[in-house]
Image (tube, grey):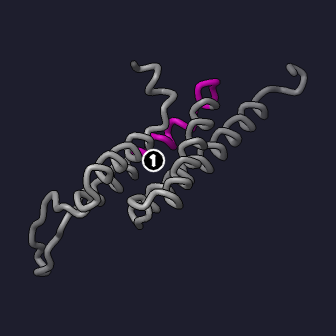
Amino acid sequence: MGQVIRYVPLLAFVVIAYNIIAAISVGMLDSTLFSFGLLSGAAFIFLVKDALILAGLVLLYAELSKATRTTNISIADHTLSLGLLLVCLVELIVVPFAGTASFFLITVMTAIDVVAGFTITITGAKRDLNAIPPSAM
């Protein structure tokens, strides 16, 4: 199981959770998880869709830390992340319940994952190549 998780883009879990919740009922995304009053007198309301975006941000950080590896697994991970981005883009355009600002932000997170992942990996690979003396090549 641990080996499979290394290949799967973590943001896929957020996309899957969004799709399951929205498929059951789009209104569930606007359900309140909790709320409380702030000192300013304003009410802080945390919705299900806010929790999904927060989970996406946390998992995006984890994805960026995974991108620092320069192994064959990272190449597969980047490829799957690109596939997830394509799925999100198609879903955003075609699926009615995915045409929301929340899903757009999740799609942007997958795009950041793809661009940053490739950038970090290429930069790390260049650094590795520069560490090898020319006579050793």
Which residue appears at 38% of the width and 40% of the height? 13
State the SS at label 1. Answer: helix
The answer to whether residue 75 is above or below residue 29 is above
Residue visible at 61% across and 29% down in the picture: 76
- Which residue is nearer to you in this view: 18 or 42? 18
Residue 81: quarter of image: top right
46 displayed left or right of 120: left
Q: Main secondary structure of the magenta part?
A: helix
Locate residue 129: give its quadrant.
top right
| Residue that numbered label 1 is attached to | 60
Classify residue 126 as left or right of residue 53: right
Q: Is residue 69 above or below residue 23?
A: above
For residue 49, what is the image quadrant? Answer: bottom left
Residue 94 lies, in percent from the top left, at 51, 58
Residue 72 shown in magenta? yes
Q: Which residues are magenta?
A: 59-74
- Figure check: 64 above or below 132: below
Q: Position of residue 57 (x, y in %)?
A: 40, 52
Residue toward you, 117 or 46: 46
Residue at far bottom of view: 41
Residue found 44% across the figure and 38% down from its top? 10
In the rendered view, tell whether residue 132 sits above or below residue 55.
above
The picture places residue 40, in percent across and down from the top left corner, at 14, 80
Please say whether residue 69 is one of the residues in the magenta stretch. Answer: yes
Q: Quadrant of the N terminus?
A: top left
